[in-house]
Image: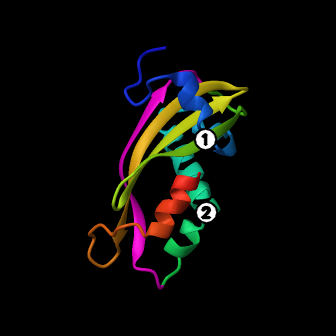
Amino acid sequence: MSRISYIDNMAEWASSFHFKYPIKVRFSETDMFGHVNNTVPFTYFEEARIEYFKSIGFMQNWVHNTREEIPVVADLQCDFLEQLFFDDEIDVHVKVARIGNSSVDLHYMGTKEGGVCFTGRGTIVQISKKTGKSVAWTEEMKQKMSAF
């Protein structure tokens, strides 16, 4: 396995995830070579990230029409380790790597039958819908993210 810049020790890194979301690979997610297209894990990251944020109570607030804050993706990266195919059942794991003032760095790991298929990382920033400027996390939000 090649070196992944955001992972120092794969075993330690992988064992520190506590949230996962199951996904079954759909036929439409495969390409002409029969494996999952390289753009698809980003959709898996999104699905798992939304479920993670729901589990700590953030998503319900962000989608409420009276809220000014929304999350946006500032950057996103994926490293591919194993091919995936139609009908594979995978788990996409999500964890908080670092909490900033208004941003959070999330790490992702896709596993199939216990083996790592892909890894990823990305930064999410909470912004104001009106101004487009970043909005600081509350202490309660930081605590909820830290607890996971």
Percent position (x, y) of residue 138? 43, 70
Q: Is residue 78 visible?
A: yes
Which corner quadrant of the image does residue 102 belong to? Answer: bottom left
Percent position (x, y) of residue 31? 55, 31
Q: Amino acid at mark 2?
A: Lys
Percent position (x, y) of residue 47? 58, 52
Q: Is residue 70 magenta?
A: yes
Disc 2 target residue = 54
Vertical comparison of 96 with 69: above or below: above
Magenta range? 66-83
Vertical comparison of 57 with 103: above or below: below
Q: Residue at x 53, y 23 (%)?
A: 10
Label 2: few (<14), some or many (≥20) within 10 Å? Answer: some
Identify the residue at the far bottom of this view. 66
Vertical comparison of 15 with 121: above or below: above
99 sits left or right of 116 in the view: left
122 sits left or right of 37 in the view: left
Q: Amino acid at mark 1?
A: His
Percent position (x, y) of residue 70? 42, 69
Mark 1 and mark 2: span between their CA atoms?
14 Å
Q: Secondary structure at mark 2?
A: helix
Q: Residue at x 44, y 24 (%)?
A: 8
Disc 1 target residue = 93
Q: For this rendering, which residue is in front, 75 or 10?
A: 10
Label 1: few (<14), some or many (≥20) within 10 Å? Answer: many
Q: Secondary structure at mark 1?
A: strand
Q: Residue at x 49, y 72 (%)?
A: 62
Vertical comparison of 117 with 52: above or below: above
